Amino acid sequence: MDYAASYLTIQKMRYQDKMEFEIDVDEGIMNQQIIKLVLQPVVENAIYHGIKYKEGKGLIKITGTYRDGCIYLTVYDNGRGMEQEVLDHIFDAKNGEEKSGIGICNVQMRLQLYYGMEYGIFYKSIPGEGTAATIKIPFVEEEAQETNEDK
């Protein structure tokens, strides 16, 4: 979360009056670990594909909750949103000017390789209203985390 907050602070300075951000993460999950470079590419996409070309001020909101043994980190933007056809191919490795590139595809592959196929990024979007990218990972009890850190 600290890295995401720092990244958003830098982007807010860059975009000045174009962007605001909020971070609201349940205290109970703040000590959970996640593989590196997961949030930043999702936040970057929210800025560059969501609010960069939005008329007026954009909002990036990161929330984090615990539910049913899992952690859900959601990056929401009130930008231009995406059509269903784009969502259907969002994890395809692409090249080209209007394509999202390999960043999100790479993050999705790493999340599923590390945590399992039921985990990863799940998108919801409404054209003209915004996009929510939710990252689902398992909650790990503190004792198990300490054992993993010792390895």
Image (spheres, grey):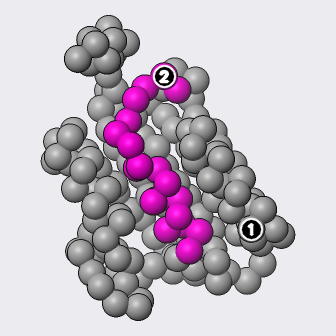
Q: Residue 37: which numbered mark, if any?
A: none
Q: Residues within 10 Å of mark 1 (few under 14, many from 20)?
A: few
Where residue 44 appears, x then y in whole percent? 53, 64
Query: What percent of the width, then of the height, locates residue 62?
Result: 58, 48
Q: Which residue is identified by label 2?
A: 31
Q: Based on the picture, tell me whether residue 25 belongs to the magenta stretch.
A: no
Question: Residue 14: x percent and y percent?
Answer: 74, 68
Quadrant containing the C terminus is top left
Q: Residue furthest bottom?
A: 97
The residue sitting at 33% across, 12% down in the picture is: 146
Residue at left offset 56%, top offset 29%: 26
* Label 1 sits on residue: 14
Residue name at image x 35 percent, y 64 percent: 104
**Label 2, residues with CA under 10 Å away: few <14, some 14-19, many ≥20:** few
Considering only order in the chain, which callout, 2 or 1, is on the residue closer to the N terminus? 1
Point out the stretch of residues depicted in magenta: 30-48
Q: At label 1, which amino acid type do we have?
A: Arg
Asked if the stretch drawn in magenta spans residue 42, the answer is yes
Amino acid type of disc 2? Asn
Distance of label 1 from label 2 (alpha carbons): 30 Å
Quarter of the rendering occupied by the N terminus? top right
Left-right relation of 126 to 68: right
Seen from the viewer's position, the closer of residues 117 and 144 is: 144
Q: Secondary structure at mark 1?
A: helix
**Can residue 26 be seen in this snapshot?**
yes
